[in-house]
Image (cartoon, rainbow, N blue to C red):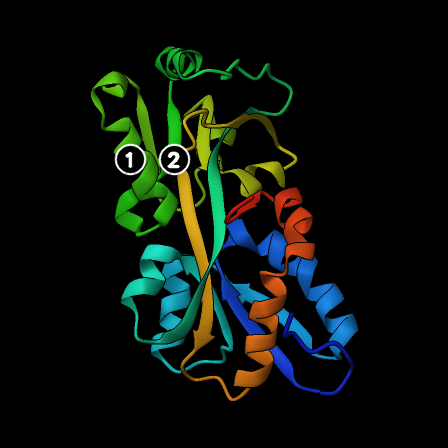
Amino acid sequence: MCWLAAPVSAAALTVLAPASVTPGLKALAVPFGTNTGIAVTVGGGARDKVFEILNSGGAADVVVLPTADLITTPRVTGMIPLGHIAVGVGVRAGTKAPDISTPEKFRAALLAAKGVAYADPKAGTSAGKVIDQLLSTAEFSRVKRVPVQGLAVSALLNGQADIVLQMLPELAANKEVALAGPVPDGTGVDFSAGIAAQTVNAVEAQAFLSFLTDPANVSAWKNNGLEPIGH
């Protein structure tokens, strides 16, 4: 355990991350700040927005993104794996959630839907690409797809679709959605964290990375929709 264990710095950290991993990061930023005196601000938004900030040299100390993205960017160093976030299945609040407890029941629910909303993969979102790959397989070829620019849940709320596939923590946080559960075959995205090339707080950033992967924080991650590596 090498994160800073006493209030020794007035430094502040800016963490860039997409919405699906933000709840866990915010939950851990509070005890980290209490233990170290280092304030942590979590923001960023969509994947493309995070890269826009990185490439323009904007404020950034720690970056959390899909592992595949971090592997290929020179703007982030010291990558460490965090874990896996599943794609969730949701319906409009107040309606009955389908039984998706097995792959067969999940497939049947999607085939019966008047529309299945998900992020348009052309928008560059990691979830959209993963979901599009799933729906492109032969067994889902007859699913009525509703690709959405922006949040997939919008098509659920405006009546274009009656099932939404979106990152599980995002659906769980939306009070207008009833969560049926995760896609039963484990479809989802692996996330990792690293230090932004433009940081001037490298020591503090490394301390936060160590805190994120501390075994004592496994439950905080799980409670916020991310399954840590090895757990």
Q: Which residue is mark 1?
A: 132
Q: How many C-alpha atoms fall within 10 Å of the one at disc 1: few (<14), some, or many (≥20)?
A: some
What quarter of the picture does the C terminus occupy? Answer: top right
Vertical placement of residue 136 versus 102, above or below: below
Q: In which quadrant of the rendered view does residue 25 lie? A: bottom right
Residue 48 at x, y = what percent?
A: 36, 61
The residue shown at (65%, 69%) is 1
Q: Is 27 situated left or right of 229 in this image?
A: right
Q: Are marks 2 and 1 in contact (CB under 8 Å)?
A: yes
The residue shown at (57%, 17%) is 97
Q: Which residue is mark 2?
A: 118
Vertical placement of residue 209 versus 231, above or below: below
The span from disc 2 to disc 1 (Cα, nearest Å) is: 8 Å
Q: How many C-alpha atoms fall within 10 Å of the one at disc 2: few (<14), some, or many (≥20)?
A: many
The label shown at residue 30 is none
Task: Find the residue positioned furthest to the left.
Answer: 138
